[in-house]
Amino acid sequence: MFEVRNAEWLRDICGPHHRHLQLLETRLADYGLKAESQGGGILLVGKAEGVSIAEAVLAELERRLRTGAEISDMDVDGAVEAAQTPSQTFGTFRSLKKPITPQTRGQSRYIDLLANPDNAMIFGVGPAGTGKTFLAVAAGVSELLSGTRQRLIVTRPAVEAGEKLGFLPGTLEEKVDPYMLPIWDSLRELMGQEQMERRMARGEIEVAPLAFMRGRTLKNAFVIVDEAQNTTVPQMKMVLTRLGRDSRMVITGDPGQVDLPGSQPSGLKHALQILSDVEGVNVHTLTAADVVRHGLVSRIIDAYAAHGEG
């Protein structure tokens, strides 16, 4: 019997109509696990290993409730993934407004790479919804707030989804901002609007198009190159060679979603081909199994991949 501290937490752990317990049973079906709410706790029946994993999952869910967080189906999935690899210690991000918990095994390994300050260059590649950019931003914010780096710099190529900035109305800032919205959203979530604006005003946070990196040496900074599949080969070489002393760089992108016009080769694909064996370069690939958006998204990604379109 897994005892839960109070009745409200027990309801939250079980989920609406005991959906979380049903999900736990489904994920651990190979162990014949059955989970049932009884009295002030949850009765677990099945193979010993399955019961042990389930207890670890429930303990993690209870820990989340103690921090004031809510529990979703994705949290249950993530806790199961983490509990099934108990011998591995994953990195953590400090000083964030909200705790970061890996939702999948792939995310856990990615966080471990990001949290290790000795990894100067990391390629995080995979489909949309795997958290590759958000987790990179979390790592950068953590290093900025803890004083490990003096600046956080996030850059993206300014052409996406077939739209060229020169043909869009408005000033350069107005043209660029919509492409940067996912980054702003992540920063607000991780550090709050007030602190984000204060550090931007001090020049500690910079979010800018890739062209703004040319001719610079980025020292003592955590640099994120997002949507890197839409860089050309010369652009990728340019930005990778901006890395300065006491800096780290994370390059994120989806090689299956290149929006470059014509037949231009992707700088990300090219870099992965020639740099994967270079000492000091780390490559981590996330897959559809790591998608943490709506459950339907991973099935859509798989369907497109099966037809050679991703």
Image: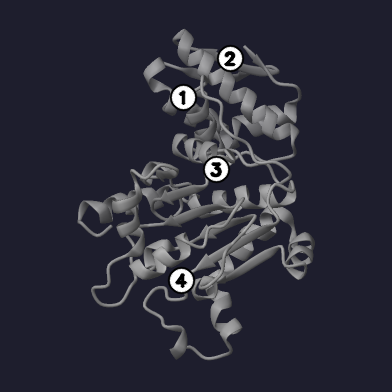
Q: Which of the two labelled residues, at mark 2 and mark 4, occupies the earlier sequence position?
A: 2
The label shown at residue 209 is: none
For disc 3, the marked residue is 114
Q: Is residue 163 left or right of residue 35?
A: left
* Residue placed furthest toward the top: 48
The label shown at residue 43 is: 2
Vertical arrangement, residue 31 with respect to residue 71, above or below: above
- How far apart are labels 1 and 4 at the CA level? 44 Å
Residue contact at pointers 3 and 2, CB within 8 angstroms: no
Q: Amino acid at mark 2?
A: Leu
- Secondary structure category for the residue under label 2: strand
The residue at 36%/78% (across/down) is 162
- Secondary structure category for the residue under label 4: loop
- Secondary structure category for the residue under label 3: helix
For disc 1, the marked residue is 25
- How far apart are labels 3 and 1 at the CA level? 32 Å
For disc 4, the marked residue is 157
Q: Which of the two labelled residues, at mark 1 and mark 2, occupies the earlier sequence position?
A: 1
- Secondary structure category for the residue under label 1: helix
Nearest to the observer: residue 94 or residue 310: 94
Foreground tag (3 vs 1): 3
- How far apart are labels 1 and 2 at the CA level? 12 Å
Q: Which of the two labelled residues, at mark 3 and mark 1, occupies the earlier sequence position?
A: 1
- How far apart are labels 3 and 4 at the CA level? 22 Å
